[in-house]
Image: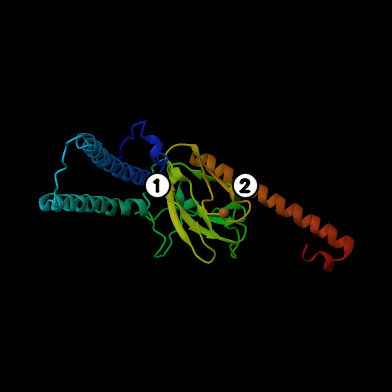
Amino acid sequence: MHLLLHPTLAFFGPAPGASPNAKQIDSLYQIILYIALVIFVFVEGALIYTLWKFRARKGAVAAQIRGNTRLEIGWTLGAAVILVVLAVLTFAKLSSIQTPSNSGAEGLTLAQNGGVLYASAERKLPPNGKTLPITVVGRQFIWQFVYPGAGEADGLGAPYSYEELVVPTETTVSLDIVSADVVHSWWVPALGGKFQAVPGYHNYTWFEIAKPGIYRGQCANLCGRSHARMIATVRAVPPAQFEAWLAYQKKLIAEANAAAQAARAKLGSQHGAGEVENP
Ligand SMILES: [Cu+2]
């Protein structure tokens, strides 16, 4: 179910969801908001009416009322029923928030691009098991994204990017969120909940973006002096464009590594290898 927030209420709502999990969170938020709004108007209305109707007047004697058992049982039960309804709705939506959906028909062909099956109790997979796994590394003060495609057995050589995460549309992307130093918090509001990046732990989340676009977020945990600069951008592009971008990124990294190696070799020949072992 996806409700539409009235424009005057949109200010109070979260960013409109661009991923199925974020949409579920959004609609849950709206259900609770509308129920709360009805109660708020009723309670405040009754209060204002009572203040006016029974205001102090000359000669008026206030009635002394000593409780009303039926009324008290009524509002206790009423509040309990509302809480039960909200709890049931939340649990009903929880699995579609936590469990990734299958990639769309137009999504990336995952078999060729590291559509890896993870035998992990914590990492939830889409029903068909296919997902594009990306590791998100929080570090002071930048987000790093590591994509599948390690060239060597040691796992090194995987393409990566900083600050901007590029993903294919219509593809279920599952994130493995880690930290290289202190606690950070991954949060792109339009793509779902907030997840902490804690050194020594893995946190998992996922999203699936239908249409090309740019989604912005920011580290949501004060992680040091330049925390405010720790921004994140997710750019969704069609799968073919993603593959081209990833290939180009690999090429750039390989070229930069080759240039660094050449520079190191040159320095080594000038000063003797011992001096530049650990530049
Ligand atoms: Cu941070």
User: What amino acid type is highlighted by mark number 2?
Assistant: Gln
Is there any visible trace of residue 26 in the rendered image? yes
Image quarter in which the C terminus is found: bottom right
Side (left or right) of 224 relative to 94: right
Q: Quadrant of ligand 1?
A: bottom right
Side (left or right) of 28 relative to 113: left
User: What amino acid type is highlighted by mark number 1?
Assistant: Ser
In the rendered image, the residue lying farthest to the bottom is: 274
Relative to 180, is 253 above or below? above
- The residue nearer to you, when weighing 236 against 246, is 236
x, y (%) of residue 156?
A: 61, 61
Label 1 CB-ligand 1 distance < 8 A: no
x, y (%) of residue 28?
A: 31, 45
Q: Which residue is mark 2?
A: 249
In the picture, the disc for residue 151 is: none
- In the rendered picture of this protein, how many numbered marks are placed on residues? 2
> Could you give the CA–CA distance between mark 1 and mark 2, rounded to whole angstroms?
24 Å
- The residue nearer to you, when weighing 264 against 82, is 82
> What residue lies at 49% left-to-right and 39% top-to-bottom?
238
Side (left or right) of 46 relative to 215: left
Name which quarter of the figure residue 170 lies in. Answer: top left
Q: Which residue is mark 1?
A: 103
Name which quarter of the figure residue 48 lies in. Answer: top left
In the rendered image, the residue lying farthest to the left is: 70
Image quarter in which the N terminus is found: top left
x, y (%) of residue 8?
A: 36, 31
Query: Dot 2 surroundings within 10 Å: few (below 14), some, or many (20 or more)?
Result: some
In the rendered image, the residue lying farthest to the front is: 59
Relative to 246, is 152 above or below? below
Name the secondary structure under disc 1.
loop
Name the secondary structure under disc 2.
helix
